[in-house]
Every structure is written in C-alpha cells, then in structure tokens.
Image (cartoon, helix red, strand yellow):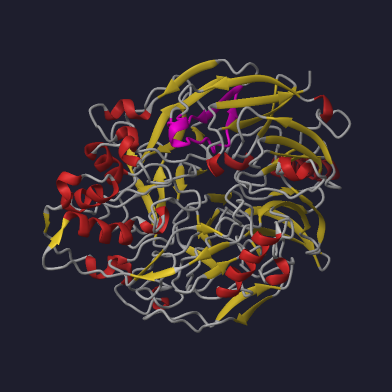
Amino acid sequence: MPKTYSAFFFLFAVIIFSACKNEEKKSYTGWRSYGGGNENIHYSSLTEIDTNNVQQLKPVWEYHTNDVDTANHSQIQCNPIMIDGIVYGTSPKMRLFAIDAATGKEKWVFNPFDSLAGNKMAFFVLNNCRGVSYWTDGNQDKRIFYTAGSWLYAVDATSGKQIISFGDSGKIDLHDGLDRNVKDLFVTSTTPPAVYKDLLIMGTRVDEGPAAAPGHIRAFDTRTGKLRWIFHTIPHPGEAGYESWDDTTAYKHIGGANAWSGIIVDEKRGIVYASTGSASFDFYGGKRTGNDLYADCLLALDANTGKRIWHFQDVHHDIWDRDFSSPGMLVTVTNSGKQIDAIATTTKTGFVFVFNRETGEPVFPITETPVPTETSLVGEKVAPTQPIPSLPKPFVRQSFTEKDINHLLPDSSYEDIRKKLASYKTGIMFNPPSTQGTVIFPGFDGGGEWGGPSFDPETGLLYVNANEMPWVLTMVALKQDSKKQETFLEAGQRLYKANCMSCHGTDRKGSGNFPSLINIEKKYKEDSFNFLVSSGRRMMPAFKQLTADERGAIASFVLSIKKNQNNKFVEVPNPEDAWRKLPYSITGYNKFLSKEGYPAIAPPWGTLNAINLNTGELSWKDTLGNYPEFAAKGIQTGTENYGGSVITKGGLLFIGASRDGKFRAYNKRTGKLLFESTLPAPAFATPAVFEHNGKEFIVIACGGGKLNTTSGDSYVAFALP
C-alpha cells in the first residue's frame, strides 16, 4: 500500500477513534433523567456557580402546583427533569406539569385522574412520586412516563395529552403481567422507569405486610406498553435462586423483594442494575425461611432480555426491613493501581458496597460474619451470618449502648431512657426481633435513605447524607381465628391488630411517619373510610383483599360506629389466609424518643459524609440540619433527612433534605458550609442542576409534609443574579 494511503488510513483511524472517545464522554450539563442520568451519580459539570460566588445565589422563580393538601400532610419528593428548556415534575396530588425552565411559567398540566372519571376511589389513589422519565424516537415522538396510583402513564411531552396508542388508552395497570393474580393487592411505583433503547425497565412498590404482591422487575415497550420481559425476584421452579426458599411454594404466596428505589442502566454494556427490598412480611420470616433470594439483592440483568448476570445479597433472610434503600451508582474507581468500572451502593446499615460492574467481584473484601441467631418467635429461623465489607468503613454508628444515650436531655429523661434501653435487646445491629423489644439501629430510615448518594467523577468521592435515629421494634403474638360468636367490634379489634397496628400503633396514636387515627371519625364517614382502606393513599397500601364485612368491622372499631358494633360478624374462609395470617405482628414503627421528643441517642442525628471510593477512607463528615433550640446554644445536632444531594464541577454540594427547611451549599472538598437559604417548605427531594440559555439553575421541590412539617406545593429555582 502506498505511503500516502497508509498515512490517510492512519489519520482516518485516529479521527474515528477520537470521535468514539468523545462520544463516550458524558455531557453532565443537563438533567434529562432521574438522578441526572442513567448512571445516577447526581453530578453536574457546570461551573458558573462556584465556591467564590455561591453566596450570591437567589431564588429566580417559584412555581406553585396549587393542590397542596395540608390536612393530610401532602408531599413532593420529585427530582424534576429538564428537556429542551422545559422542566417536568409532579404535584402533591400526582398531576404532571411542564413549565418554562427560565421563568417557571406553566405550559400544561396533566391530571391522571381525569381518565378515571366516575371512579370515586381515584382521589385516594395517591403515591409519592420521586421522578418522571423521558423517551423520544429522535423525531416528533416525545414522551413522559410516570406512575400515579397503580397506573403507568404515557404523556405527550409537547402537548400534555395522554398517548392513546400506549397500553390501555395511554396507561398500563401495574397489577398486570406479574405472573400471579394480584388484582386485589397493592402495586404502584415511587420511582420512574429507566429508559434503555425502546424499553421502560421498572420495579414497583408493594405492601410490606403478609398480603403483598411479588416485586418482579419488568420491561415494557416504550411505544406500545407491551410487556417485553420479566425477571422473577421470587424465583419460580427451575430458576436460579428457587432453592434459597425452604418452602417450594413460596413463589405462589410470598410478596416483596421489590426494586422500589429505582433502576439504573449501563447503556454501553447493556446491563441494568436493580436494588431490591426485603420479602414480606418484613419482621417475621417464619413462613419464608431460607435466604430468600432475590430479596435484599443488588441484581445485574441483561437489559435486552432480563436474564440474570450476577447478584449480591447484602442481608440474608431479612427480618429488619433493611432494604437496599436507593439505586446504585455507576462509578469508576482506582484500586491497586487499576481503573475499575464499578457499581457502588449505600445501605440502611451504613455500609457501602462496591463491585465490578461486569463480574460482580467486590472491589473491597466482604466477609460472611456470624451474627446472633437465638429467637423466641415460633417458626423463625435466623440466618447465621451476614456479609460485612472491609471497606469503606460504616458512615453511621451501628450500635446503641448506655454510653451513647443523649447527654442533652434533662436528668429525669436521661434516666428514663437508660431504664428503657436496659429492658431492650440492643448493642448488636443484627439482634433478631423480639417480644421484649429490639433496638433497630441504624434505624428503619437510616443510615442512607432513598435520596441516595452523589459521586464526583473527578475525585472519586462519594457523598451520602444519613440518619442516625434509633427505633424500637416490638413483636406481639396475634390471635388469628375468630370466635364462634363474634361481634363487629370484636372482629374490628382483632382485624385492626392484624392489619393496621403495625403502622398506627397499639393505641391508634400513630407511629413513625404514620398518622394518628384518634378522632378520625371527624374526617371520614364509613363510605369514605371504606374507599381509603380499599385503595390506599401515599404510604398506606390498599387492602382490597379484605371483605366488605372485614372493612366494616374495622370501621366500626376505628370510627366508633356504635350502631354497627353489635352486628354479628361471620368470617369468610380464604385459601390465602394460611399464608396471610401470621402468628406475630409489630406494635408500630416506634422511634426511640425522650419525653421531650428528642432522639434517645446522642447527636449527630443527621450527617453528610464524603467517602473516597478509591481508598475506602472517610474524607470528611459534618452534621446536616439543626434544631433551632440547640443551634442557639452553639450545638450542631443534625436532623433526620430525606432526599439526596447533587455535586457540581464548580466545587459545590447542594442539598435540601433536612427537617429544618433549609437549602444548603457546601464546599465539596472540605465540607465547609458556604450558603444557606430558608425554603417555603422543607425539601424532602433531590435537586436538579441544569444549564438553559447559558445560565445555570438549581431547582428543588418544596413539598414538606414528612416529620410533621408543614406541607408545600412549590418548586423553587436558584441562580446567580
């Protein structure tokens, strides 16, 4: 070949190689999907706002959805997206909106319940929505996908109209296609589908009690809504993992093992990663003994087919509700001198796990470690070991003993906490649930929560906000069989304990984030209460599996309907009762608090943590949020927090999340607080960062509602003047 041709082909090859390399480089200037992109690293390469000028940041617009529901503590947990100058998000009552990115001016609003006209339950079918998805064919077909109630909707991104050719007149019922009849069970989705080619890949949120649907992962066609593949998170006969369940019929009855926190995609490799939660019922596993694959797993699946590539289970036979609380992140780390494309995931236990994306090989060694197995609960079989990573070290405390009691309490409260603590099982993170009470620490909502971590690809630092709130889990034995002669009141009390007590408490005063039912008869009549129980609302699952008489009996007790309480109750046998009627329940999701309402454990109660994923070492740590009464004394306590952070190339970490309703910016390298602003309501959501017309914006949803805070209905955009 002549030298001129050789030179030409060499130059051509260099150009093609360079183009390919540039194509592989991600543009982090926009926010086109949940978490900023399919890698879910919450990162922006924008630099207009930096450590030198962030103090000048101002709100430049505020968009009100005008459907706040303060009486029911409505929330907005949505991480909005920005496509072609339009911001898309959701409202407290699940309306989808499109607004101008520069001004916040409304373009259109889609109300999903317009398509359910005449359905009296539609108002109640509300779920927390943490984001929406965007897909386009590259031409005129531009779609927004999101879930409201049990329906996945397809909406035209330009007009806000339902796309009738998708599914059933523009929506899919998420009850369908689960290879089991779950029409009477609770199925929704809190996180948006991941988009890969022409597939929508998603998990679901299901009930956490015994009457739960399976959490199988599904892929739907973006154009038609047809099911393209399904992965059984509770394996069927002949599938890998089936042998991990002692009962060979578990797949017919057991629910949960659901990827409620979201799905991420390695588009280059065609791999989806799903993080699943515990199998149901969360706290008693006597009817699901074994390791329970694929509950509490990080799953790597072929994005085109749904076939399993590898998995890792971080909690065997989970009886503590220690779900993977957020999707993983696709990161690149340097370990032993080698660059590794990895997936990193944070957990409720405070561990960080890091794996090779392709093989599932741990980047840092993981050891199966013996844990306590003694239990007084009949039928329970506790797993003898749990996997513990050598690095990174836990980003929260993992035990609560007397030396950790809150020293800010008055002497009488301190002594009260000390006596209670001495009566509980405590000091070991994997102590089994018990009837005497077991301290759950890290708690049900911590260390890392659903907002998930952020990652800086420049430095290899992972940032995670965490909760350090102790809870007390107390099991109680249940009488399951009705009496031969039972009144509605007696049946209502029994059914309340079996179905409602775990959330609303033994005294009906509420627990955790679940509301009190005292005086609820002033708000609901029997028919509206029936609708609520049948359809669910936000954190409350639907109880469609209950018969009309069972719902009536519960209503007679909870609403104190005197005229019904002496009615004769006749129980109708149900084949599923053998699985759904458990010998134990819990007395509620009870935070371990002092008489003054403060955490029983010493601060910090909320933290920000920067972890070097190359070395596994902690880079810096700070408190997140404050109680004003302690801050006035110079005491930084931190608070419970929900929603994640974002990282920018400008050297900043932005976060809302804290119960004190502040929006903050930190120096990402040092953890120094640089900016603080009071929001119209607490922002229990992750911000979005994007560039529009050459200007950098940070937008965050201010919905409040959690932790007994005031509800809000707005999205606030910050920018430089």
Considering only vertical position in the picture, is 544 above or below 369? above
The residue positioned 34% from the left and 66% from the top of the image is: 254
Quadrant of residue 339 in the image? bottom right
**36 or 664: nearer the viewer:** 664
Check residue 72 for magenta coloring. Answer: yes
Q: Is residue 111 left or right of residue 412?
A: left
Residue 166 appears in the picture as rendered: no
Residue 464 % position (x, y): 70, 52
- Placement of the C terminus among the 4 image quadrants: top right
For the point 74% across and 67% down, which residue is it? 393
The residue at the far front in this view is 412
Q: Write down the quadrant of residue 699 in the picture.
A: top right
Taking the magenta stretch, the answer to whether it contains residue 15 is no
- In the image, is residue 434 above or below residue 630? below
Residue 640: give x, y in percent of width and height: 63, 49
**Residue found farthest to the right:** 52
Q: Is residue 543 left or right of residue 283?
A: left
- Percent across and percent down for residue 685 are 59, 39
In this orientation, which residue lies closer to the viewer: 244 or 573?
573
Q: Position of residue 566 (x, y in %)?
A: 14, 53
Number of dots carrying numbers: 0
The magenta segment? 69-94
Residue nearest the observer in this picture, 352 or 503: 503
Residue 219 in sight:
yes
Left or right: 407 as drawn, with respect to 239: right
- Which quadrant of the view contains residue 377? bottom left
